[in-house]
Image (spheres, helix red, strand yellow):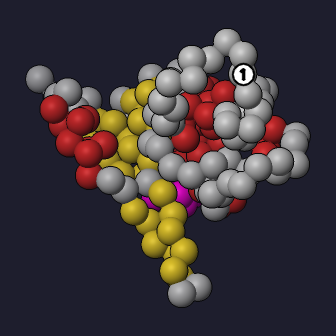
Amino acid sequence: MRRPCIGVTSDIEIRNDREYFYLQTRYCRAVEEAGGVPLVLPPCDSSLQALAQLDGLLMTGGEDIHPRYYGEEPCAPLELSPDRRTDFETALLNEAIRLKKPILAICHGMQLLNVVFGGTLWQDLATQRLDHIDPGLHVC
């Protein structure tokens, strides 16, 4: 029986004016442990084209999405994900939805999924206090 091929998004790190794709190995190990074959998708056009051949998509964690993607200005200190990643993953998600591919979104991926569907985000839970949140709750 053929094992499902799962696309796993990678992050971008900029060091010394150079871009590097990177991914925590735990994502690929988890896909393998679940019986799948992980295929790393760097943010480039060929990855978007490869989506049609995949059985599912895993959107990985990462830094904060710039608030302009959901119509806000920054109101708290943020560690921003590169726009190149956000733009690519937005296109990737829209294509995965169009193709009706199963999607598992984790942390940054879940936030982006929310934004793609028109949602907004709390930029900083410590300063934008939510009265119904348990103060001991750990947020990714």
Q: Is residue 22 left or right of residue 139?
A: left
Report if residue 130 is visible in the image. yes
Residue 20 among magenta residues: no
Q: Quadrant of the N terminus?
A: top left
Vertical position of residue 121 compared to residue 44: above or below: above
Vertical position of residue 7 compared to residue 19: above or below: above
Vertical position of residue 89 compared to residue 23: above or below: above
Q: Which amino acid does the dot numbered 1 rest on? A: Leu
Q: Is residue 108 left or right of residue 129?
A: left
Residue 26 image offset from top left, x and y in percent? 26, 45
Residue in the foreground of this view, choosing between 58 and 1: 58
Vertical position of residue 14 compared to residue 59: above or below: below
What's the residue at 68%, 54% (across, down)? 78
What's the residue at 33%, 36% (across, down)? 6
Residue 136 image offset from top left, x and y in percent? 50, 24
- Please give the range of residues in magenta: 42-46
Residue 69 image offset from top left, x and y in percent? 79, 44
Specify the quadrant of the image occupied by residue 27.
top left
Specify the quadrant of the image occupied by residue 45.
bottom right
User: Which element is circle 1 on?
Assistant: loop
- Spot the residue most to the bottom: 16
Residue 134 image offset from top left, x and y in percent? 57, 17
The residue under label 1 is 130
Residue in the foreground of this view, choosing between 70 and 104: 70
- Spot the residue most to the front: 135
Specify the quadrant of the image occupied by residue 135.
top right
**Magenta portion: prevailing SS class:** loop
